[in-house]
Every structure is written in structure tokens, then in C-alpha cells.
Image (cartoon, rainbow, N blue to C red):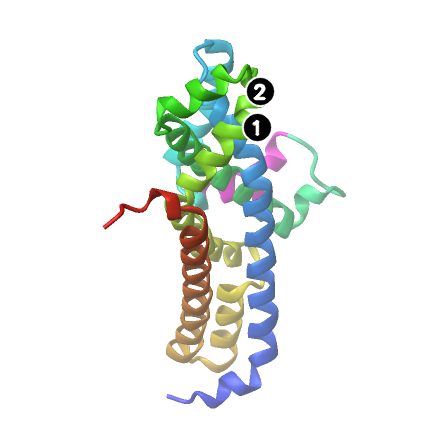
């Protein structure tokens, strides 16, 4: 084993690390924005509101992320003209799929968190004369988002790991960087091991950050010993 090749390729890994971080970060932020109304719609009793949200979630949770990426990157050209548009860019297609995928999973997390709220919180909001939109904004969503933190941290980690498929469509993320290094030096163990270590550092940093958030926002849910 020759780990000196990592010193010669550190700039490639750094670029790949930055690409992974910004793509995942953008996907999570935009996905969360989409997931909140979708999660609320999923709880609606109106089939015109409920069914589209259910169908969207069912598709993206029921199919592999790699298949979704192939459908957009390779298959979209059969439906629309992609030449000269952002749809022919690999990074845009990957980001689009990541956003829709994480939004589907996150909306189910939010839906479950809303359903787990004590009825007393909602009744208290109504007793104060709050309208339904105001109760959602001031009481239901803030409380649900706090309760959803443990489950959402898993989704963030899954998104980091799932982003490795971006390297398959020519994007030089961490996995793409490892593939390039391996093709240059024929050293699969060293190249992919280092990429795996970078993912581990990113994963445990996320876990640490969420634990700090849980300690701060979920103190009132801890049992009194």
C-alpha cells in the first residue's frame, strides 16, 4: 500500500469534499422547504390535497436514488429537449434528484412529528383563538420540528451517503475523486479508504451537531429523575 498518492491528490479530494458538502447542504435546505407543505398536505383529509402528496412520497421512497438519478440524467431527454439547458448539466440533475428525494423522506418525518404532538398543545392554541395557519406557524410546526430532530438527523446522514451516486454521472464529488485517483494510480484500497474516512468525518460532525441541537431544544422532553 502506498498512501503517498494521497498527498499528490489532496487538491482533488478537497474539491470533491467541497462539492459533496455544498450539494448535500443545498438539497437539504431546499428539500426541507418543500417537505413542510408536503407533510402538512399528507395529513389532509381532502383527497385532492392528500393524494398528490402521497403519490409523490410513495414514488421517491419506493424507488432507489440511483434509479431516480438515471431517469432524470439519461431519460429526461426522451421527454423534453435538454440541449442547451441546465438539464444537460450533471450537477443540476443530481441536485434536482437529491432535493426531491430528501423532501419525500423529510415530509414523512414531519408528518409523523405533527401526528405525535400532544392534543393539549393544539387545543390550547385553539383556546387562545388562533386560526389554523397561525397555530401551525406558532405552535404546531415549531414543536413538530423539535421532535423530528432525531429522525431528521438520520435523513441528513443518509443524504450524505446517498450523494455518492453523483460520482456515477461524471460529478467529481468525494466518490468521483476516489474513482479518478484509482484510475491514475491503480490503488483502489488507498483511494476509496480515504474517501470513506472523509465521509466518516462528515457523518460524525453531523451527529455531533444534531446532539447539541437536541440537548438545547429537547430539554423539556427529558424525564425528571
**Pointer 1: what residue?**
137
Q: Is residue 14 left or right of residue 107?
A: right
Q: Which residue appears at 53% of the width and 45% of the height?
A: 98
* Residue farthest to the left, as pictured: 225
**Pointer 2: what residue?**
133
Residue 108 occupies quadrant: top left
The crowding category of the residue bearing disc 2, from other C-alpha atoms within 10 Å (few below 14, some 14 to 19, many at least 20), is few
The crowding category of the residue bearing disc 1, from other C-alpha atoms within 10 Å (few below 14, some 14 to 19, many at least 20), is few
Q: Is residue 150 left or right of residue 79?
A: left
Whether 134 is among the magenta residues is no
Region of the chain picked out in magenta, as a range: 67-79
Q: CA distance from mark 1 to mark 2?
A: 6 Å
Q: At which x and y percent is residue 61?
A: 39, 35
Q: At which x and y percent is residue 179?
A: 49, 69
The N terminus - image quarter? bottom left
Residue 171 visible, this angle = no
Q: Which residue appears at 37% of the width and 31% of the height?
A: 112
Q: Are marks 1 and 2 in contact (CB under 8 Å)?
A: yes
User: What is the chief secondary structure element of the magenta stretch?
Assistant: helix
Q: At which x and y percent is residue 176?
A: 52, 65
Amino acid at each position: 500500500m502506498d498512501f503517498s498518492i494521497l498527498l499528490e491528490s489532496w487538491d482533488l479530494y478537497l474539491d470533491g469534499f467541497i462539492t459533496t458538502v455544498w450539494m448535500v447542504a443545498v438539497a437539504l435546505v431546499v428539500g426541507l422547504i418543500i417537505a413542510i407543505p408536503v407533510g402538512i398536505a399528507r395529513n389532509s383529509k381532502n383527497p385532492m390535497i392528500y393524494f398528490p402528496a402521497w403519490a409523490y412520497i410513495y414514488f421517491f421512497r419506493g424507488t432507489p436514488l440511483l434509479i431516480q438519478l438515471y431517469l432524470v440524467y439519461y431519460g429526461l431527454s426522451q421527454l423534453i429537449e435538454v440541449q442547451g439547458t441546465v438539464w444537460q448539466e450533471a450537477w443540476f440533475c443530481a441536485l434536482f434528484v437529491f432535493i426531491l428525494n430528501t423532501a419525500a423522506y423529510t415530509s414523512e418525518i414531519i408528518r409523523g412529528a405533527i401526528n405525535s404532538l400532544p392534543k393539549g398543545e393544539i387545543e390550547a392554541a385553539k383556546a387562545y383563538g388562533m386560526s389554523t395557519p397561525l397555530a401551525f406557524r406558532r405552535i404546531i410546526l415549531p414543536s413538530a420540528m423539535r421532535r423530528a430532530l432525531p429522525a431528521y438527523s438520520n435523513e441528513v446522514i443518509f443524504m450524505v451517503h446517498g450523494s455518492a451516486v453523483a460520482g456515477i454521472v461524471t460529478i467529481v464529488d468525494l466518490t468521483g475523486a476516489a474513482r479518478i485517483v484509482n484510475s491514475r494510480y491503480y490503488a483502489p484500497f488507498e483511494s476509496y479508504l480515504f474517501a470513506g474516512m472523509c465521509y466518516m468525518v462528515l457523518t460524525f460532525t453531523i451527529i455531533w451537531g444534531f446532539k447539541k441541537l437536541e440537548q438545547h431544544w429537547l430539554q423539556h422532553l427529558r424525564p425528571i429523575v
